[in-house]
Amino acid sequence: MGGRAAGAISRRLHLGGGTSIAGVVAQRLYPDIVTHLSSQLAYGSVLVTGTNGKTTTSGFIAAILNDAGLRVWRNREGSNLMRGIAGALVIRARPGGNLRRGGQAISIFEVDEAVVPHMVEAVPLRVAVFTNLFRDQLDRYGEVDSVSARWQRAVSVLPASTTMILNADDPAVALLAESRQDNVIYFGIEDATLDLAAQGISPERHQTIDTRACAKCGAELVYSLRFYSHLGHYLCPNCGSARPQPQVRATSVTMNAFDQLRITVETPTQQGEIVIPLPGLYNIYNALAAIAAAQALQINWEPIVSGIQQFKPAFGRGERVQVAGRTIRILLAKNPTGFNEVLRTLFSEGEKRHVLLMLNDNIADGRDISWIWDVDFERIAQQTSTLTITGTRALDLGLRLKYAGIDAQAMHIVPLTPIRAIGKEALTRPHEKETPHAGSKNGSVTGARKIRPAAKPAQTHGLAYALDSALQQTPVGETLFVIPTYTGLLDVHRELERRGLTPHYWEEKGP
Amino acid sequence: MNASNKPLFTLTLGHLYPAQLNLYGDRGNIITLQRRCQMRGIALRVVPLGIGDALAPDEYDLLFIGGGQDREQAPVAQDIFDMKGIGLWAAVEDDMPVLAVCGGYQLLAHYYRPAVGPDMRGLGIFDAWTIHKGANVPRCIGDIAIEWNGSTLVGFENHGGRTYLGTAKPLGKVLKGHGNNSEDHSEGAVYRNAFGTYLHGSLLPKNPHFADHVLALALHRSYGLSDDDLKKIFPRYLSLEERSAQGTREKKRAAKKNGAHGAANGVIPPPIDIDDTLEWEAHASMLERLGLRNAAGAALRHR
């Protein structure tokens, strides 16, 4: 009962889905709780970390392992700080202190980059997956380089028995295994048609690069292929460090539809086609990482294929919700690279889209929103049919879009809370706005506002209003794409759930 | 706007180390300067100045330098000293407007002393220095508002080093946040027309008056525009007397590029009404979130 209340409080405080508080309490009472409980997992533990793609990658792995007949435990709902890990184990513990049915279980821990060193010390790992390293939440973790340095320290204490799964195309990740001879599997893309230059995308204009210096010697890396941001085929002209040859690779990629990617995969033991039911180039990497992890765990090819092909996207990773004849698709975008890839996926077909953007700056999003200026919003000018903007920093995002060349008339900005200094009339909707200096009217307006009007005026702030407004502008039969930051995603989910539209996403799946 | 479509003025911005120092949305500052020039019929040419490029001050009308992470800042520190130091000193002494944000600000002061390792030498344009007091002293992170020239500037700061001013004047006084060192309420530094600041977020988009101020200084310096002319182009432009607090020593200079576009004084366009509503609303909403209600109201009244 107490745990449930704590979960409710945690959710209310925007701390995540709700298991975190249980973990905080347990860790305080028994600091070694994670080590104690995780050692009871018969099939061991898999760690998934990186800036982007953790949730989808661990989702793929879980689906594969489920199809292979294992009992899979995950710390879901993105509460992937240490307290969330503890919580995920604690809620499965019996009063006696042992895990329920730990005998058939394998656990997948999806953890933030900064938590990796603690995790490595606390949990014996069979497999450790490192997806990528991008600029994300610098205010929380410091800089990209310091995260990378922390990873390297964590990796240096990994036992030799742990298999490392590394992204060959990310120079910040690939170099982690330099000191290791065995037990490393690299994955990467080898389809040259995906190169940015081959697609006519100028890397200078459309991409932000997070890692350009060689981690070994500091020289600037040279790319023969670039897929997005700093991911691609690279070489250091100074010290000769180069992309390692991946064992698990996508040799050809075709995009069937917005959310259908057909890839040909080659591994040391298998070759075959797999259809990934998700949009975006980044999901190819997520699938390859999962395939590599599954092979490290000696899983057969059939569950690998079925696990990925029948994958149901996690909340915020492109899943679909039906509302009054419209479809809502929700695509989480929490950093510039993630955002750029979502935009590239959405707008690559030249089709105009209905879009609701939501920018929050709560702690879990990162308080610093400078990164929106590194997102290539220029590419969506004239590409949106309707555009609604909300979130705690809706005005900043609106400003970003204005400077990207999007007409103020073409966007509807809906702040989450009314801004007092701005009169209701002045809320940024130029077509409805009155001149700010209409002094003669001001007196009467102010006076009238003191009396509560009998008919409540239409609310012009808040997520519910933003969602209604965006849906109203989306014709029946069409799709509204909702692109929120992390806590925005939780807010959107809460709002949809309030309307009875989605299942509780933190409910445990399975028997 | 102007029938000929020919720009009235051309400004050249030297963007220092765009590939290395671009961590905190520095691109937003460049985009803002570009758009605000465009709206007024001013052509702004942006020239990237990377590692190895020399800085010839005559080729530029204003300079910008952003912030980066330590690994990228070290080679930059060496290059700025070797390749650009003399050019930058000359430019600043010649009243060229220079905007330096975050790491760039630190590089223009005397030195940066990391928690471990040797000092990183700076250019000493600002009589100021920066000390990192070690991993146990928390970084200065968060939203920040400062008072500047009787108005406000808002932004986000994220720096491990503490900067202390010698004879350099601060850019402004901290209203909420840390500023230079979290101790003396100073934020940033000013020397002549060079501005150093920790504010990003990005800085210029939601501080349009500051963006315009920098552009006005550039037009004044390169084209000899008078205060009256500048006020037509930039309604919020403050004349020298009005910003005497900054102590900028001014000298009347012959219009450097006089003749290139005809006599400057004759061709000032009629005042252009630029709609900065969204800029000021974003500015005011940040002030309000920081609890500075009166300042928020004032910002909206002045737009």
Image (spheres, rainbow, N blue to C red):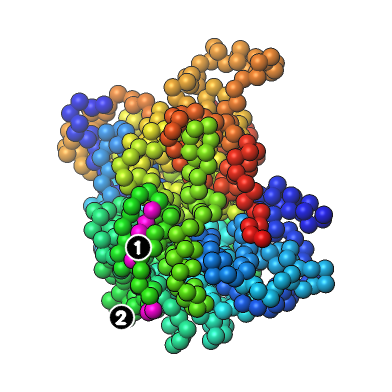
- What is the quadrant of the C terminus of chain A in the image? bottom right
| A27 lies above or below A10 | below
Give the label on residue B170, or none. none
Residue hosting label 2: A240
Residue A260: where, in percent of width, then height?
38, 53
Q: Which structural element holds mark 1?
A: strand
**Mark 2 falls within which chain?**
A
Is residue A478 highlighted in magenta? Answer: no
Residue drawn at x 33%, y 25% is B271
Residue B59: where, in percent of width, then height?
23, 52
Amino acid at the residue labelled 1: Ile
Specify the principal SS of the magenta part: strand
| B295 lies above or below A205 | above
Amino acid at the residue labelled 2: Gly
Residue hosting label 1: A263
Range of the magenta residues? A260-269
Residue A118: where, in percent of width, then height?
63, 73
